[in-house]
Structure formats: structure tokens, C-alpha cells
């Protein structure tokens, strides 16, 4: 591989094809092959390709992820086919299985508890704190007036600025104050809206503080204006419940034993951070996949959920379970800041398709769908973990990946899938069975198939 000239200035100014040439020639052992691969991922419609190229800077290729769907999600009495963009093989299957299970038991009930988002002007002030308090109370109309142009549309949709509050944070850091601003952003995620409002308000704050008799002697420095991705006031709850006897899925499990062990597994994730991280990771499998498919910001959602999971000082499970009076209840409470307008929603054709398949929900409806998807995913994982073990289902889905790596034909895939139907398909055993089927020697490193 050539690695002669890896530094470059002005890369972003190059054309897309020049970027691809530079990347492949400087970094790949076979530049032509790399260029052909990149070209093979191009969209046939030039306009669509251009749109994708312009989502980010320095685009060189499209990067595919599968878009799957999990049908039969009954949520608040309505059936949804939930789109999921994810690479992990067992996630969609698990969601679909849970959705079907709960469809037959009344479905999911999702409730949006609140939709408020928060942003901050983080600033330092060295003067008289009580004069600052008086100033912030006095200039509220000016702060709102400064954002009128930005909030006009949002206000017609029932959103806008809900409150502006001075927070004295000097016990955390010398001279540190915040203007904490609450927003309602309706169907948009609102990041740009919130940041724009904060920046306009910061100008007013700076100016007023410099000219106010009480505060002018102190030094006020705005450090930054930014929304918070922690959204504990933008919360949704989703729940399933049924009589203990109805947990019977025909597999012969003892429902009392199942519920007891399941509840214990949730409790472990409530008290043990090592387990909580994995438990919540499984929940995020279900949440992120729908967040991504619907063009939302999964990093923001991840940040919010994990901060929420540690809100009392210890990282804990996002789901909870109770078994009382013969009833099994399982629920999730998560902060989900989502948009169904703006951002990628009008730009990415598959995001539009995903939203249309969901019936073009508003942000609150989408919060309910995504919370249910996270709960479904966690139900599937805990059900497997506390009964058969996780590897059976995981490896079953993984079988196809192994067979694809081996470049098995469709007929070979069908035969080997049937062969492994009642076995856990460990990699070595799949390779061995594949070689036997093809009549070729089993590589020494792969060991012996059972
Ligand atoms: C794997 O992606 C997710 C699980 O580990 C989640 C869990 O353990 O609950 C199966």
C-alpha cells in the first residue's frame, strides 16, 4: 500500500472525483478497484446522488445500511409497520417477534409525558449577582423581542419560548451563570431553532448588562450558546401488560417462573451498571434503528438516554418490570427529542418513505412508536437471555452472514439453514458443514464439525 503523501491542504475544495482519486491512489493498494467499488454504489439518479453528496462535506461514496421493517406493532390501538435501519442481524427479527407477541396481548400503550426542550447561554459574570437577577427579570421582553423573527413560524404552530430563567451555578464553577431557556418545538427536533434563539438573546444580555447601572461594573462574558441534548422534560413512556397466564407463548415455559426470572433480570440492570450498559445497549438497538430510519439524530437520542439512565448518580436500566396480583407489567421511560419536519425528513427519499409507511406521524406519535420499539427489543433480549440464552437467536441470524462470507449459493444456503435449524451455528461448524457440502477440504484452523 502506498502511504507516501498522506497530508493534504485544501482537500475540501477538490471536486468529488478528485477526492476519490486522491483517497484511492494514496491509501489503497488497488486504486482502480476502489474507484470501481465507489462508482458501483452511486445512485442512478444524478440529482438524488448530488443531494446525498451535499448532506456532509468531503463525501466520497454512499454507505449502505439495510432498511428492514418490523410489522405488527400495535401501539395505542393502531398497527404500525416499523422501519429500522441497522446492520446488526438479529434486531429486526427480535422486534418483529416481540411486536407479534404483544399484538396478541393488547399491544403497547405509549404516553408522551412532556415535550419541553432546554437550551443555555453559558456565561461568566464577576459583578453583583442580585443586580444580575434584577437585570434578567427586567429584560425578559427584550430577550423575547430579539427572537421574534425566528419564533414567528413556530408560534403559529403552537411552539416557541416557554421560559427564561437565570441559574446561579457558582458553586460548580467560579463566576458561572446560565440563562436557561425552555422551548416547545412541536414537530421539529428544534436544534437550529433553539441555537438561533439563544444566540440572539445572548447579544441582548451582553448589551444590557454592559449598560445597566447595577451590572455594568461586573464583567459578563458569554462562553457559549447551545441547546442541551439532555432532554429530561421531553419524555415518553411505553408499556405492555398482561395476566401472568397470558405470558404463555405455547413453548411450554412455566409463566410464573418466566415472569419471576424476567423481573429479576430487569432488577439486576436497575442495580448493576455493568449489566445496565448492556441492557440499555439492547434497548438502543431498537431505538436507534427507528431514529435513523426516520432521519433523526441518533447521537442526540443516545446522549439523552444515557444521561437519563444515570440521573440519580448511578447508571441504571431504562426499563422496569412489576409482577403484582397476577399481572405482568413491563415499561420504559425515555427522553426522545425527535422531529418529523425539517432536517433530513424532506431530503432523504428513504426517510420520506419510512415516515409515510408509519402514516406520517407527528413528533409525539413518533416518540411513542420509538419507545415501543426500544421496549420490544428489550423484551426479546430478556426473554432469550432468561430462557434459551441469547446465542441461539443471534447465531441463527448470523448464519446468513457467515454463508455470505463463504459465498454460498442460494441452494447451499437453503440446505445449510435447514441443517442448522436445531443447532447453534458456530463459525467453525458452519465452515465445516459448508466444505462437506461442497466436497472441499475443511481448513485445518476451522476444526471438526459435529
Ligand atoms: C446485543 O446487541 C444486545 C444484547 O446484549 C442486549 C442485552 O443483553 O440485553 C442482547
Image (cartoon, helix red, strand yellow):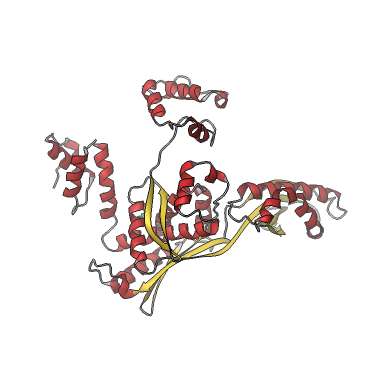
**Residue 151 at x, y = what percent?**
70, 51
Which residue is found at the position 43% from the left and 31% from the top? 44
Q: Position of residue 196 (x, y in %)?
A: 68, 46
Residue for point 54% across, 56% down: 362
Determine if residue 151 is in view.
Answer: no
Residue 341 in view in this figure: yes
Residue found 52% across the figure and 56% down from its top: 336
Quadrant where the N terminus sits is: top left
Image quadrant of ligand 1 equals: bottom left
Q: Give how far across and how far down residue 177 sits, in percent.
A: 71, 54
Q: Does 172 sit left or right of 282 as displayed?
A: right
Residue at image x 27%, y 63%? 387
Q: In this view of the protein, which residue sits in the foreground, 401 or 304?
A: 401
- State whether residue 447 is above or below residue 420: above
Furthest residue toward bottom: 325
- In the foreground, 174 or 296: 296
- Considering every residue shown, the one lying at the far right of the view is 213
**Percent x, y of residue 89:** 33, 48
Q: Classify residue 78 by image quadrant.
A: bottom left
* For residue 311, side relative to residue 182 (left or right): left
Number of marks in picture? 0
Amino acid at each position: 500500500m502506498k502511504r507516501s503523501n498522506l497530508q493534504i491542504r485544501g482537500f475540501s475544495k477538490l471536486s468529488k472525483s478528485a477526492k476519490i482519486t486522491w483517497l484511492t491512489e494514496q491509501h489503497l493498494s488497488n486504486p482502480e478497484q476502489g474507484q470501481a467499488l465507489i462508482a458501483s454504489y452511486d445512485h442512478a439518479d444524478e440529482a438524488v446522488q448530488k443531494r446525498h453528496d451535499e448532506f456532509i462535506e468531503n463525501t466520497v461514496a454512499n454507505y449502505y445500511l439495510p432498511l428492514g421493517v418490523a410489522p405488527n406493532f400495535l401501539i395505542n390501538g393502531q398497527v404500525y409497520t416499523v422501519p429500522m435501519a441497522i446492520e446488526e442481524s438479529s434486531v429486526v427479527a427480535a422486534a418483529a417477534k416481540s411486536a407479534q407477541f404483544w399484538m396478541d396481548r393488547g399491544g403497547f400503550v405509549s404516553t408522551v409525558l412532556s415535550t419541553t426542550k432546554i437550551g443555555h447561554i453559558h456565561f461568566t459574570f464577576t459583578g453583583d449577582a442580585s443586580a444580575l437577577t434584577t437585570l434578567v427579570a427586567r429584560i425578559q421582553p427584550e430577550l423575547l423581542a430579539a427572537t421574534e423573527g425566528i419564533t414567528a413560524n413556530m408560534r403559529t404552530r403552537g411552539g416557541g419560548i416557554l421560559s427564561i430563567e437565570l441559574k446561579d451555578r457558582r458553586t460548580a464553577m467560579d463566576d458561572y451563570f446560565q440563562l436557561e431557556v425552555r422551548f416547545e418545538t412541536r414537530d421539529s427536533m428544534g436544534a437550529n431553532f433553539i441555537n438561533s434563539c439563544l444566540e440572539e438573546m445572548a447579544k441582548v444580555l451582553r448589551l444590557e448588562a454592559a449598560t445597566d447601572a447595577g451590572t455594568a461594573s461586573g464583567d459578563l462574558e458569554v462562553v457559549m450558546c447551545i441547546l442541551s441534548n439532555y432532554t429530561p422534560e421531553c419524555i415518553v413512556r411505553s408499556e405492555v401488560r398482561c395476566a401472568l397466564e397470558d405470558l404463555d407463548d405455547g413453548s411450554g415455559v412455566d409463566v410464573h417462573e418466566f415472569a419471576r426470572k424476567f423481573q429479576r433480570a430487569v432488577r439486576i440492570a436497575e442495580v448493576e451498571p455493568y449489566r445496565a450498559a448492556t441492557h440499555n445497549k439492547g434497548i438502543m438497538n431498537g431505538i436507534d434503528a427507528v431514529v435513523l430510519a426516520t432521519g433523526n439524530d441518533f447521537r442526540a437520542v443516545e446522549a439523552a438516554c444515557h444521561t437519563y439512565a444515570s440521573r440519580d448518580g448511578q447508571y441504571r436500566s431504562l426499563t422496569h418490570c412489576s409482577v403484582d396480583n397476577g399481572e405482568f407489567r413491563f415499561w420504559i421511560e425515555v427522553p426522545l427529542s425527535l422531529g418529523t419536519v425539517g432536517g433530513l425528513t424532506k431530503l432523504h427519499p428513504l426517510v420520506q418513505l419510512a415516515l409515510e409507511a408509519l402514516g406520517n406521524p407527528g413528533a409525539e406519535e413518533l416518540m411513542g412508536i420509538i419507545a415501543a420499539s426500544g421496549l420490544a427489543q428489550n423484551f426479546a433480549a430478556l426473554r432469550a437471555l432468561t430462557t434459551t440464552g441469547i446465542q441461539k437467536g443471534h447465531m441463527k441470524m448470523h448464519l446468513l452472514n457467515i454463508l455470505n462470507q463463504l459465498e454460498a449459493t442460494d441452494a447451499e444456503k437453503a440446505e445449510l439453514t435447514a441443517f442448522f435449524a436445531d443447532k447453534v451455528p458456530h463459525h467453525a461448524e458452519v465452515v465445516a458443514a459448508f466444505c462437506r457440502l461442497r466436497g472441499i477440504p475443511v481448513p485445518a484452523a476451522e476444526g471438526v464439525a459435529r
